[in-house]
Amino acid sequence: MAKNEDIFKKVIAHAKEYGFVFPSSEIYDGLSAVYDYGQCGVELKNNIKDYWWKAMVQAHENIVGVDTAIFMHPTIWKASGHVDAFSDPMIDNKDSKKRYRADVLVEDYMAKIEGKINKEVTKAAKRFGESFDEQQFITTNPRVVGYYEKIGEVKKRLYPAMDENDLAGIKKLIEDLEIACPVSGSRNWTDVRQFNLMFATQIGSLSEGANEIYLRPETAQGIFVNFLNVMKSGRMKVPFGIAQIGKAFRNEIVARQFIFRMREFEQMEMQFFVRPGEELKWFEYWKEERMKWHLSMGIPAEKYRFHDHDKLAHYANAATDIEFDFPIGFKELEGIHSRTDFDLNAHQEFSGKKLQYFDPELNENYVPYVVETSLGLDRTFLAVLSHAYTEEKLEDGSERVVMKLPPVLAPYKAAILPLVKKDGMPEKAREIMDSLKMDFMCRYDEKDAIGRRYRRQDAIGTPYCITVDHQTLEDNTVTIRERDSMKQDRISIEEIVRIIHDRLKA
Ligand code: GAP
């Protein structure tokens, strides 16, 4: 098993064992690509939301928030293009009856070749030792060169076929590569068809005449259709932004990779309305701002990269993704798109209502252009969680698993621990717990030896452990243990709140 795959499995197991993420409906064998957040997960998730909201809404005087409904008028999804074009190419295996995303089958085929390249490189590195030159090896070793050529040939057929919606071409590629169903092992495939990712449901009782509506596949449209309401009621002046955090639903065909690709997930989106012609300046501004936000969590810069889009969607004139180095490789975390006036224009056309802004400086009406920042909350959670997961060997030979979460995001900020369960220590610890719990999320724990209790807090990422010992009863001091360094300081009880506040801000 590849090292990263191994780490990914450990993160998933840890997330379940310590109450971060559970498979949904587990006692009924689960529901594919749907997950529940547990007692620690919900705290971490709320803290991420709060961290984003503060940076986007609280810190920007010209950005306000909304919380719009999941159900919306079905014509909205006609106007946005989702009814006609929000689909993935799918293919079924006739023997296993399993459904796959056709492009992902081909991508998996290429990933297998990449795996072979990695094996060759690892073998050669072992053989040549210090003198190994990886660049030279991959450009001259005939087997590796052959593998790269094969990948190149496949890409040359797959990407144009995807761009041109050439479904027969994608099927032919799957046949030519002799790709077999991972379950049945057969190559008995149906034709490739487009599969719309929106979930549909009925609104109203049948006797009233049921209407088909959709669960929203993105939160953005709730912002666009409220553009006028917010602009007028909030007396907003361009440039201004509207932010929203909320659920989105997509009937993903490839349902795996834990919370990376879910059927029900949350987005944190912001639409920034600007003067036409100024959108590329604001696109650059938001690109930089959003990267700064990610880095402010303390995760190293090399874990992030931009992926600028070469081929733009018909409504965009610039687009980039912020990618994160997940245990499954560099993948999209956030999209930043300059969406022109596409959405507001489309809603004007379909609703018949004017969606314009009167610019007092220019003395003219126009449909503003939009720069969007769209971040997946669950993917941010996964990025933070997988980066935090650390296995450590300690000086005394023991081992610990510690979640090195940014303290500001940690589910609990402090644990209050009486050293032993007697001599008045639990009572004193309870007093401290009561005095702290409205300031921070805290845990009280008196069960088991103190070392085991420290490990339990390490495993959920609690940055500070406050221990009440014999000395506490004499001079009102406690020890404060820092999670990552495990260093302990003695401080007075009155100082606990200030010290934790100061350290969380640092
Ligand atoms: N309004 C633009 C929009 O929705 P997107 O690239 O489709 O753009 C934005 O989605 C973000 O939402 C992605 O960068 C990703 O973080 C998150 N996301 C999309 N599909 C997801 C899924 N199935 N599961 C989890 N997160 C997802």
Image (tube, grey):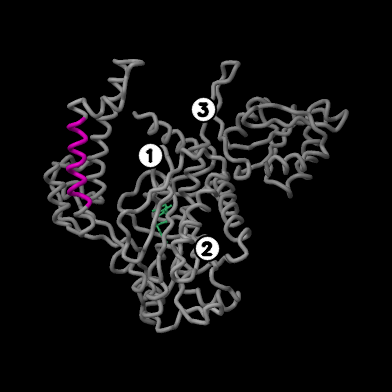
Judge from the rendering whether residue 211 lies leftward or rightward of residue 382; answer left or right: left
- The residue type indicated by label 3 comes to Glu
Q: Quadrant of residue 72?
A: bottom left
Residue bearing the label numbered 1: 329
Q: Which numbered disc, 1 or 3, marks the residue closer to the eye?
A: 1
Instruction: Name the residue that disc number 2 marks.
Output: 244
Q: How many marks?
A: 3
Q: Residue at x 83, y 26 (%)?
A: 471
Q: Position of residue 446 (x, y in %)?
A: 70, 32
Q: CA distance from mark 2 to mark 1?
A: 28 Å
The residue closer to the viewer here, 79 or 359, is: 359
Residue 465 visible, this angle: yes
Residue 50: % across, % down: 60, 54
- In screen coordinates, is 352 left or right of 469? left
Q: Is mark 1 within 8 Å of ligand 1?
A: no
In this view, which residue lies farthest toward the bottom?
A: 352
- Regarding residue 443, the answer to whether it shows in the image is no
Label located before the other in sequence (2 or 1):
2
